[in-house]
Amino acid sequence: MKYTVYETATGKVCRAIECPIDMVEQQLAPGESFVEAGDSDWRCCQVDLITKEVVHFVPTSPSADVEWEPNRKEFVLSQIGQRRQDNNLRIQTLERAQARVVREFLIDPDKVGDDGKTPRQRLQEIEDEVADKRRT
């Protein structure tokens, strides 16, 4: 038989288990109880503490960067979250590249490189791009 295990204080579903009824109690932690699972998916349910029925539930979003995906029954990165993650990765890449340009600047700040720019110009380009990525 399938059972839904939940927190007795909140009704929050912890997990689903499948075992004979006489084995269920052994699998519960303190503060947990169970109900028959039925056809419900434990990832998007909670237990109504008054009726002891499993009811549909969409959890509170853990951040503004994710959204609930009902088919997968989990939070996924939103478009805004994906853009923010991409921007952060680009900033990290730029800041790693910046070390070389800083060394060049300290050695000879006016030397023009193969790209036709001085270290000061390249540093300013990096800083401008980082600032742009942080704004979006």
Image: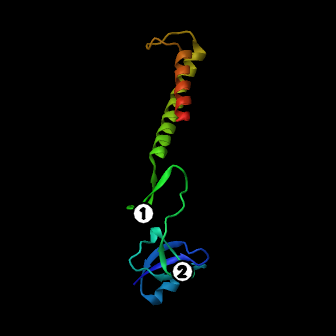
Above-or-below relation of 69 to 5? above
Q: Could you tell me how far apart the alpha carbons at marks 1 and 2 are, in whole angstroms?
A: 24 Å
Label 1 neighbour load within 10 Å: few <14, some 14-19, many 20+: some
- Where's residue 92, x and y in %? 52, 35
Q: Callout 1: helix, strand or loop?
A: loop
Which residue position holds label 1? 73
Picture layout, residue 13 above or below residue 60: below
* In front of the other: 74 or 88: 74
Q: Residue at x 45, y 88 (%)?
A: 21
Amino acid found under the numbered disc labelled 2: Leu
Instruction: From the viewer's side, name the closer residue of 58 and 118.
Output: 58
Q: Position of residue 27 (x, y in %)?
A: 51, 81
The residue lying at 60 percent from left, 78 percent from top is 31
Residue 108's quadrant in the figure? Answer: top right
Q: Nearer the viewer, residue 46 or 123?
A: 46
Residue 44 picture location, percent across and down: 46, 68
Q: Is residue 71 left or right of residue 129?
A: left
* Total numbered badges shown on the rendered structure: 2
For the N terminus, the image quarter is bottom left
The amino acid on which the numbered mark 1 sits, given as a three-letter code, is Lys
Location of residue 64 in the rendering, given as x and y in whole percent from the top left corner:
54, 50
Residue lying at 54% horizontally and 25% vertically, measured from the top left = 128
Instruction: Please rate how many residues cluster around mark 2, counting C-alpha atoms within 10 Å: few if below 14, some from 14 to 19, many from 20.
Output: some
Dividing the picture into quadrants, the one containing residue 20 is: bottom left
Please name the residue shown 49% across and 33% down the image: 93
* Residue denoted by label 2: 28
**Mark 1 or 2 closer to N-term?**
2
